[in-house]
Image: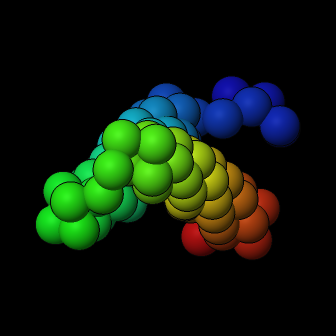
Amino acid sequence: MGMGRESRWEKDAMTVEIVFALVTAVVLAGLVFAVAWTLALALDLPGSAERRVLAAGAFLGAVAGVWRLLGALLRFDKQRRMGR
């Protein structure tokens, strides 16, 4: 292997980290949306208010998922560059 090329082990580690980041991001987004859904059901909101709560939950879930995904991947890249 030449300089600048990843070994098979490094490629496998990257693949595992990407899958881990994706799975945890989806789980986090789902949990945030589930909290909003539970809140909407528990408060017995009228139709338009319930839709707004669910839309806000979907938006916040997506933001939390992207935040988790980027955070995990950037942390992995930083550790990889440091040689860990």
Q: Quadrant of the N terminus?
A: top right
Q: Would you say 74 lies left or right of 56 here?
A: right
Judging depth in this view, the residue of 36 and 5 nearest the camera is 36
Residue sitting at x 74%, y 31%: 5
Q: Would you say 18 lies left or right of 74 here?
A: left
Judging depth in this view, the residue of 82 and 34 nearest the camera is 34
Residue 3 placement (x, y as % from top left) = 83, 37
Residue sitting at x 62%, y 53%: 63
Residue 44 placement (x, y as % from top left) = 21, 60
Residue farthest to the left, as pictured = 42
Judging depth in this view, the residue of 69 and 49 nearest the camera is 49
Q: Quadrant of the C terminus?
A: bottom right
Residue 28 placement (x, y as % from top left) = 37, 57
Residue 6 placement (x, y as % from top left) = 66, 35
- Can I make out residue 22 in this image? yes
Q: Would you say 43 lies left or right of 10 here?
A: left
Residue sitting at x 58%, y 47%: 59
